[in-house]
Image (tube, coloured by chain):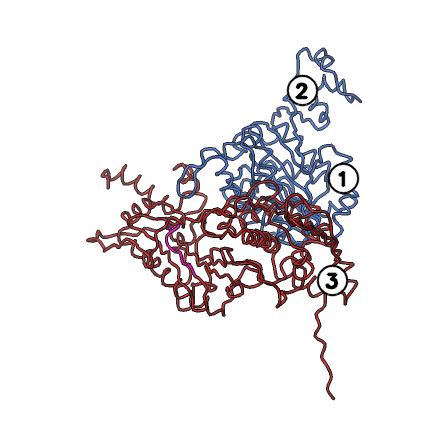
Amino acid sequence: MASHDTIHFVLRPNKNVERKLIADVLTSLSPHFAIHKYRYIGMGSFWFADFLLFHKLLLIEDMISIERTDYADRAEFNRPLRCIRVEAGDTSKVLPDLDLSARESIIWLDYDSDLRGPVLQDCRIVCGEAKGGSVFLVTLGAHVNQIRNQKDQADRQLEPLAALKFLAPDLVPAGIEPSALSLSRFPKTLADILIGHMHHCTRKANPDKRFIPLFKFLYRDNAPMVTVGGMIVEGDAEKLLGQCRLREKFEYVTGEREFEISVPPLTVKEKIALDQLLPHAQDLRLDDATQKLGFELTEQQLRAYQKFYRQYPLFGEMQL
Amino acid sequence: MSQKAHAAPTKEFFVYMVTRDITLEDCILDLLDNCLDGSRKDLKKKQIAVQNGTQYKGYSASIRLNAKSFVIEDNCGGISLDDAVNYAFHFGRRPDAPPEGDFAIGLYGIGMKRAIFKLGKKCNVRSSTKEEAFLVKIDVAEWLSRPSDWDFDLESIDREKTPGTRLEVGELNEGIPGAFVETVFQNQLRKIISRDYSFFLQKGFAVSLNGTSVAPYAFTFRHSDAFEPVRYSYVDEIGVEVEITAGMAGLPPEDTSPESTEISEAEYYGWFVACNDRIVLAGDKSTSTVWGDEFPAWHFQYNGFMGIANFRSSDPRLLPWTTTKREVDLQSPVYLRAITHMKKATRSYIDYTNARKNDLEAAKALELAAVATPIRDLPKREDVLMPQFVSKPRVEIANISYAVPKERALKVADALGNRFMTYKRIGHETFEYYFENEVGESK
């Protein structure tokens, strides 16, 4: 089932925070990279949340949303800006036609699917063709069920490790621990596999290009998800990227180390109450928060909220 | 007036040109070949013959590679000082060089130098025998700056406890660190070693890559009363022993249409060519072996077939390999004569893939019943035994084929419980479902 059938896109707080974090980092690529002249390629669904954000914040005016043919008309109807073009078709079919080598792009493939979908094939296309200086992100379902109870073409039942090797040939590290395939550790394993694949596809297509990882987010609003991404560099792009000092500015630009986004679900009233204690130079004390709220958050929830209270979304009903 | 045309080689030719002819993976294998030759010499010293068995047990090579350096280290007896001074670092094998030892797999006198130049700018080779030890430090830039002096400095050092050789390359060349840190590169290198050194690994030689040992690829053929692969040897007129093994290694593909999804193990189907047990061509489906020209070209339908032609000689110069050990010398008479044998073995299999269509159900049952058997356990025989199928009194058959959007087909496959099932099976399952529910008879 497509994600827009299950839940309104913007109602997922962690996803929402993630989008803003990424936008913050992309903003910081200026002035070394002329981001406002980039093209944005995404999968905007019917809500185009990322498109609106990137248009407003990054001033991007050339935007393409890839949508499956069955939903393309509806996406076209919902397209909120004149500068967005909806391209109908599967990603693997549409991406090769976008002439990715012609200009720098931000490409964010935000899938409903997991490893069983087109992700590895699409990475090969993007890493192979994207112009140096382009930013490439992938968001993928990270539930371990994708490698449990799987069968191969001959209908043989596959063990989780065999299933992973079947879905991601040559990408699984030798001597991988069985625990790396547990429910809790699989998202990290999957993110490592994706980053390894991006490195390989970039180098294989052109030895002068390199993939420099920036993002490795793990989060869950409902199902566990991962987002990995970075810049494809060629020539002096790597030096320019270094000059942006992203790692110093943003603790969540971690390269190959995972970063968990886990803000708690809060009501409007709770958010307002907590915000009155912020900003705060040290870690907020749990006692102080409890006193203010009248109930207890976990230490982890409080830390996560303090980190991202500025990005935390509020939702309300609208009467039309 | 007669003049001379200069023909002396330049160092740049070896550092920048010869290194282009070989892949990164294959130049690492060249170094591994030296380890194996070392162990074979050591065995010879101990007067142990290398046959089928586990004579290589105890010998090992470890490869470590990362963004900074490449190290290969073995315990295979070490290089003697005399060999090092006179032969090991010489470009090209000297005509007066002593024989590399019986059934050697290194022979051209280029592998180690080419590998060093391909990998990086600084190299230390340290080797110790029971009696003596030396260290050679190579600084490629410094060496290039002395155009007429080709020698490397060699210093005597203290012996190591375990005789062996350690080669370390630092200041890796551009592009090498990027490959070394990749899981994909490491996995593919592991797969190549596992396959190309399978026969040595099976005889006890141990190889590890970044600390994890490499298991040999298990070459097996399906064997039963109905299926017997070819397995025989002959001695070619120049004295090379050729062993041919060929037959059914995997089940023939369920669906022979090329648009069906890739089949696993496909890279292991086709012909393998080995020289002194070291695999040179793997899963070949081209004119380098039997396929094409006046013989049938490789077809998807032949998946499941495997053939191995192993050329053995105590004098490695007689074998049909090239300096990269990744190709065969297609003009070599001993190889051309072997092709005739290889074609004969292949032909029986090709015929079978057509004959089985006469009674597919019976054929599949027999194929499934045949047991995957390692080569050494196969009986010797010169012709392939395959079941024969006479066409049965024919039920008239209707072939149904139709096209639907892939997305819809995948939805059906999902509903049938396996997203990766072949299109052919999707067709069958849905037809049977309709037949059972609407027509109401069972087949």
| Disc 1 from disc 2: Cα separation | 30 Å
| Disc 1 from disc 3: Cα separation | 54 Å
Q: Nearer the viewer, residue B65 or B184?
A: B65
Based on the displayed image, in which of its 4 quarters is residue B343 positioned? bottom left
Whether A272 is drawn above or below A182: the answer is above
Q: Main secondary structure of the magenta part?
A: strand
Report the residue at 41% width, 56% height from top: B307
* B249 in the magenta segment: yes
Dot 1 alpha-carbon crowd within 10 angstroms: few under 14, some 14 to 19, many 20 or more: some
Q: Colour of chain B?
A: red
Magenta stretch, residue numbers: B242-252
Q: Nearer the viewer, mark 1 or mark 2?
A: 1
Residue B5 spot, x, y in % from top left: 71, 79
| Disc 2 from disc 3: Cα separation | 79 Å
* A188 in the magenta segment: no
Mark closest to the chain's N terminus, 1 or 2: 1
- The chain containing the residue under callout 3 comes to B
- The chain containing the residue under callout 2 comes to A
Question: Disc 3 marks which amino acid?
Answer: Asp
Q: Colour of chain A?
A: blue
Q: Which residue is mark 3?
A: B151
Report the residue at 37% width, 52% height from top: B248
Under circle 1, the secondary element is: loop
Q: Which residue is mark 2?
A: A268
Dot 3 alpha-carbon crowd within 10 angstroms: few under 14, some 14 to 19, many 20 or more: few
- The chain containing the residue under callout 1 comes to A
